[in-house]
Image: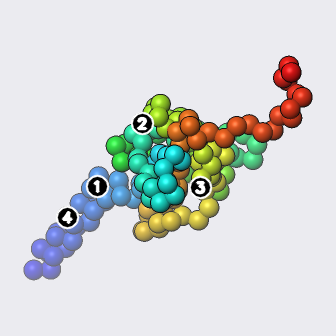
Amino acid sequence: MARGKFFLFLAASVFLVYNPTIHAWKDEGQVIHVGGKVMCQDCTQGWNEWVHGSRPIKGCKVSIMCMDKHRVVYHASDETDEEGEFELKVDKLIDGKELKAAGCLVRLVSSPDPQCNILTNFAGGQSGVNLGQPTHVFRDLVKYTLGPFYYTSPMCEEPDTSETPTQGRNY
């Protein structure tokens, strides 16, 4: 009887050690997940529709750039799906060194929608957002949820007021 329990314990141990599903789950702890949403806001609508009437944009490019002191150690991008959502996965180990999430900047890059392709800085989409505290930590899963980031229509673009009236213009 004791011999049978021993072999059962040994078989279970071998299964746990060599099960690829278990190892894939353990490897999740070596990845930083960054997700969010990209939406279109139409400034030509009334206030309520402008605030609550945004729609997701498919195919927007969002990038992540991670720095180690003064050099880029990682750069990647992702496109949004039909729901306007993106999901970036970053390995925590880059060239044998652990990546510090606080050195990563996520920002909007481009929108394929000609009706909604003007960058806004709502939630930091234009200037970029550094990763701070993770929004989800569960076992070995670390996730940062950002945004939503917004684009707006060309009609809503604000003129560049940094130029004084006499600079660069012939009157």
| Spatial CA span between label 2 and label 1 | 32 Å
Q: Nearer the viewer, residue 148 or 151?
A: 151
Mark 1 near mark 3, Cβ–Cβ under 8 Å? no
| Spatial CA span between label 2 and label 4 | 48 Å
Quarter of the figure with residue 100: bottom right
| Spatial CA span between label 4 and label 3 | 52 Å
Marked residue nearer the N-terminal end (4 or 3): 4
Disc nearest the viewer among 1 and 3: 3
Tell me which amino acid carries mark 4: Ala
Q: Residue pushed farthest front? A: 171
| Spatial CA span between label 3 and label 2 | 19 Å
Marked residue nearer the N-terminal end (2 or 1): 1
Q: Label 4 neighbourhood size at 10 Å, few (<14), some (14-19), many (20+)?
A: few
Disc nearest the viewer among 4 and 1: 1
**SS for dot 1:** helix
**Residue corresponding to mark 4:** 11
**Residue corresponding to mark 2:** 59
Quadrant in which the N terminus appears: bottom left
Protein image colouring: rainbow
Quarter of the figure with residue 164: top right
Tell me which amino acid carries mark 1: Thr
Name the residue located 86 percent from the left edge and 32 percent from the top edge. 165
Name the residue located 17 percent from the left edge and 69 percent from the top edge. 7
